[in-house]
Image: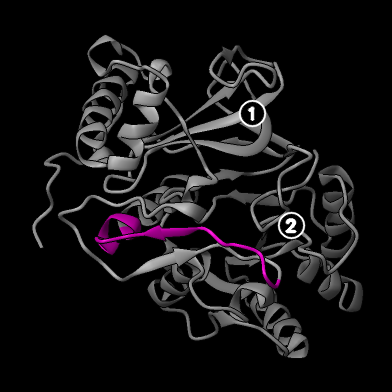
Amino acid sequence: MKALFNQTPFEIQQPSQFERYALDLFHFQYEHLEHYRDFCNHLKKDPSKVSHSSEIPFMPISFFKSHKLLHPKTPTDFYFSSSGTTGQETSKHYVPFLKEYEASYRLAFQEFYGSVTDYCVLALLPSYLEREGSSLIYMVADLIEKSGHPQSGFYLDNPQDLHRSLLNLEAAGTKTLLIGVSFALLDFVEQYPMALQHTIVMETGGMKGRRKEMIRASLHAQLCQGFGLSKIHSEYGMTELLSQAYSSGDGVFKSPSWLKIYIRDTEDPLSLVGDHKTGGVNIIDLANTYSCAFIATQDLGKTYPDGTFSVLGRFDHAAIRGCNLLVP
């Protein structure tokens, strides 16, 4: 099926380009996404009077649990789903054009880490592999394939094999990326401490009920000690997005040019606050063309003048799930 929005966000380089694109996409989604239009109308937000991306209404992320957010002319049965405990309602993110998601994560990885063909990619994501519909698994599986390295792969119930692979790759001086959910990385490194020199360890957040929640500084300190590293990297993403941000240490994230973070006032969710102030994380993900690109998450965070941001935790009433849930 031919794309209905004849622009691509992946060539954005300047803030002015982001602004024009965001406003065009807002008008497109207001026109074609009934639930988003109803939400904007409920707020009495007139699209003709929206002149800056900060004025665009951000839809609560919980709508992905109760509504099908999808352009009506792009019917699809394919969706990514969030994790959840038994009986808990999960989010569904319908994605009619998987090439948009693939372009987003491939280009972002290239921007922050270089060509994936330079790496051996090892994945320790048991809680995600044990269920269907994970966008993280889709991304990592593709990175594993694109890396082309014979030792790239997922490790579920075979920590001995992962340990052996890491030792062999280190001995060969191979650039390696080990991406894992926090509790699994902790479990692994407690059993197999080592001193890595050629490996990036990247946590994707969340204990997901497997271990006691930890503040990010404590988590990273334990992982650094266990892996013999000075920094632990992090990935920030979620089911409802098609883009990711990355941190090369200290929990400070950088976004690709098509992803922007605003912070909303915790007392007045329709108002935004400035840099260095803690509030709710609002996200504009311009890759999210046919769903909703303007999302009010349940994360708490703050932004900084250079465009980076940190995630400080979640609202008390928010159900814990597998984005970055940790306090820095």
Q: Which residue is drawn at 57% across and 38% down?
A: 297
Is there any visible trace of residue 118 in the rendered image? no
Amino acid at pointer 2 = Gly
Q: Is residue 57 visible?
A: yes
Q: For the residue labelled by badge 2, is the local secondary structure a helix, a strand or a loop?
A: loop
**Residue 19 image position (x, y, % from top left):** 30, 20
Q: In which quarter of the image is residue 155?
A: bottom right
Residue lying at the far left in this picture: please name it: 2
Does the magenta run of residues contain 307?
Answer: no
* Image x and y of residue 175, in percent: 57, 66
Query: Viewed as shown, does residue 242 lie left or right of 313?
Result: left
The label shown at residue 206 is 2
Q: In this view, does 206 lie above or below 120?
A: above
> In front here: 48 or 12?
48
Q: Residue 280 carries which label?
A: 1
Mark 1 residue type: Gly
User: Residue at the spot x=21%, y=63% of the render?
Assistant: 75
Quadrant occupied by the N terminus = bottom left
320 on left or right of 115: right
Query: x, y (%) of residue 229?
Result: 79, 55
The span shown in magenta is: 86-102
Give me the residue at 70% from left, 73% from top.
86
Q: Nearer the viewer, residue 22 or 123?
A: 22
Real-space CA distance between mark 2 and mark 1, rounded to the nearest whole angstrom: 18 Å
What crowding class fits label 1: few (fewer than 14 Cα within 10 Å), some (14-19), or many (20 or more)? many
Q: Which of 267 and 214 is in front in this view?
A: 267
SS for callout 1? strand
